[in-house]
Amino acid sequence: MAGRTVTREDIQAAAKAYCEATGMIFSEGEDKKIRLIKDSPGDNDPLVWEEAGQLKGSDPEFVMEFREYLNEVLKAKVPPRANANVPARPQDVAPKGGEFDMANWRARQAKTYSVAGKNAPNAFAVSEEANKRRLCTQIMDSGRTKDLVWGHVRVTDPATGQFREDRVSHEKETFVLLKAWEDANSQAKFQKGLIIGIADNSMPELNPDIRIKGMPAQLWLTMQVMRSWSMADRDAVTKAERRAQLKIMNREWRDEGEIVLEQEEERAVQDSMERARA
């Protein structure tokens, strides 16, 4: 959809679709900029807006993700090319008025991801099922310190009064290392010779002669990691919500070893929090 003129209404429709998929909400300020909000407004909330007929945003990485939803909106406005010999399929026909087809978009979203050799439902699929069952989600606790973020969520079935809770924590050093190596290995598939060693802090050392998205590779990686850490508290809440929803729906997708390991990690993090408070 490169070069297509984008309207403010297009971005609003894309924001609505994005929020439907992620459970976020959005608001539009007097400056016509749309703020995407996870739980409550914050300084790190991504902003998107229309400028000279193009999508603009406060966070380049988020804009890339958001553009996928915007492209779906733009596609819905363009009727397929006519072919006299082939009848149009219902899914190819744009709704009247060029409105975004939410039902069609939702039907085409990925619903699973692979973990430990098994297919597990992703947050989108679990949220859909929870909405169908009218489950209620409550954030019991969330926050961050310099070195730790956490999210504690309760999911209640109003029909029975039953509830389940889950808590997810991210310790900064571990989170940053995992994210750094994940991103570096992902880029190394396309950039030969990208990873040249391991730094003293166990971070990947990248080739200074390689640039990624217009910046030195090491700077790109640092920005990726710090951007992820700035939103790690939201990630913790989202993961806790998904796990609590699975619990109350009596669906467990981890084997016993995985569950025990996670419980041990949770206890270790809780111990470190208590020591820090002492």
Image (cartoon, rainbow, N blue to C red):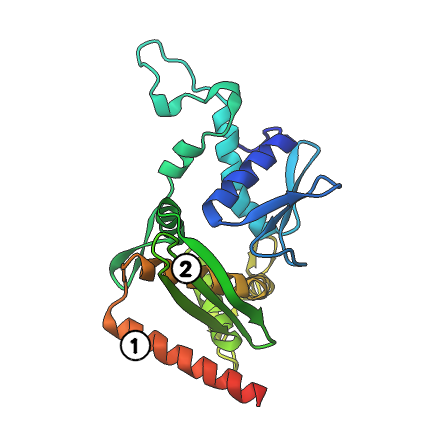
Q: Nearer the viewer, residue 128 or 218?
A: 128
What residue appears at the point 52 percent right and 80 percent down from the top-left corner?
201
Task: Kindly identify which residue carries mark 1.
Answer: 260
Per the rendering, the mark at residue 155 is 2
Q: Kindly report the distance in space between the C-alpha atoms of the residues bearing marks 2 and 1.
A: 22 Å
Amino acid type at mark 1: Val
**Horizontal and vertical percent position of residue 271:** 46, 85
Q: Earlier in the sequence, mark 2 or mark 1?
A: 2
Amino acid type at mark 2: Val
Q: Image quadrant of residue 266?
A: bottom left
In the rendered image, the vertical position of residue 227 relative to residue 81, given as above or below = below
**Horizontal and vertical percent position of residue 153:** 46, 64
**Horizontal and vertical percent position of residue 176:** 51, 71
- Left or right? Give the position of 215 relative to 90: right
Q: Nearer the viewer, residue 131 or 52?
A: 131
Asked which secondary structure carries label 2, the reply is: strand
